Amino acid sequence: AGDTGVVHQYVQTALLFGALRALQSGADELAGALVAFSLVNLEATAFVLLLFFFWAFSASRLRLVAGFLMTIFLLILLAFLLMPSWLFPYWGAVLSAWRLELYPSTFSLLSGWLPGIGERLAQIILAIAIALAFIEWNAVRAKDLPWLYWTASFTAALTPFFGIETNPALLAFTLPGLLLALSIMQTRWGVLGQVAALVLAALVFGGLWAAYIWQLWAVFVFVYPAFLLTLLYWVRWWATRPPRLWADMLHKSVL
């Protein structure tokens, strides 16, 4: 079941971030359809989905919303045709999964570590996460696609701090953000950047596997998301402003 969850998460990640490529090609309706097909494991992707719609309205790319709604309508219609009674069992299963609390969150971990003030600390973290999301979502309004890609990666990394349950498999959704940061390191800092990116990738993936084997849930809820957020902030300038000025391109070629 765990392996299946990871596979599903990688497929969902490919769909959702593939929508960015569709937007880049001007295929906004296709992007909306891909977003609709990625409506699985909403605990990991809900905030990124909301970001897509927020950006689409701010950038007047409403064909993305139209493609999403059309696809959702067709999927729901097909589901009712194949299994008319699917709706209530589906929502019952969703609610049961939410109530089971199979995986840790900032609230459950901090409350267990610090029974007196743990929940208050989790609320403070939640408030900080909301403030950061507000700042970055406001910055991405009507911006170009590289900025949207960075903000989507940032939002995916920020999601565990909203207090949701964090299944280690769901962190596969943060992979595009990690690859973005590593690719910028490679292209901006030459051989040194390539070596640093390889070493960093090995440490991250090795550390996550070790944390999963030893069930160090704090790594998935706190350590890795905080590390990735720091890394994304470090490369933010180059990620949101790709080299378009001739002076920047000349500087890059000299390096």
Image (cartoon, rainbow, N blue to C red):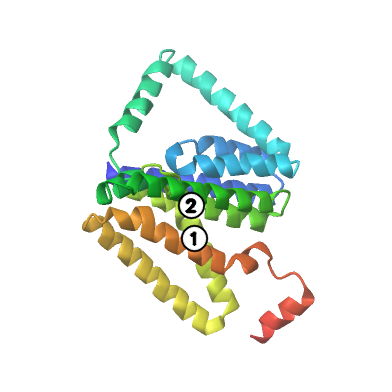
The residue shown at (61%, 43%) is 52
Number of marks in picture: 2
How far separated are the C-alphas under marks 1 and 2?
7 Å
- Outermost residue toward the bottom in this view: 254
Depth order, front residue of 34/138: 138
Residue 50 image point, x, y percent: 58, 39
* Amino acid of disc 2: Leu
- Spot the residue most to the left: 214
Between residues 66 and 120, which one lies in front from this camera angle?
120
The residue sitting at 43% across, 60% down in the picture is 226
Q: Is residue 89 left or right of residue 162?
A: left
Left or right, residue 48 beside residue 245: left
Above or below residue 70? Residue 54 is below
Q: Position of residue 158 (x, y in %)?
A: 48, 52
The answer to whether residue 166 of the structure is visible from this angle is no
Q: Is residue 144 above or below residue 11?
A: below
State the residue at coordinates (56%, 82%): 190
Q: Mark number for residue 158?
A: 2
Residue 62 pos. (x, y %): 72, 36
* Mark number, residue 81: none
| Residue 84, visible in the rendered structure | yes
Q: Is residue 131 left or right of residue 92?
A: right
First in sequence: mark 1 or mark 2? 2
State yes or no: discs 1 and 2 in contact (Cβ < 8 Å).
yes
Amino acid on which disc 1 is placed? Leu
Q: Position of residue 58 (x, y in %)?
A: 72, 43
> Residue 84 falls in which quadrant of the image?
top left
Mark 2 residue element: helix
The quadrant in which residue 65 appears is: top right
Checking the image for residue 229, the label placed there is 1
Disc 1, SS: helix
Label 2 Cα crowd, 10 Å radius (few <14 / some 14-19 / many 20+): many
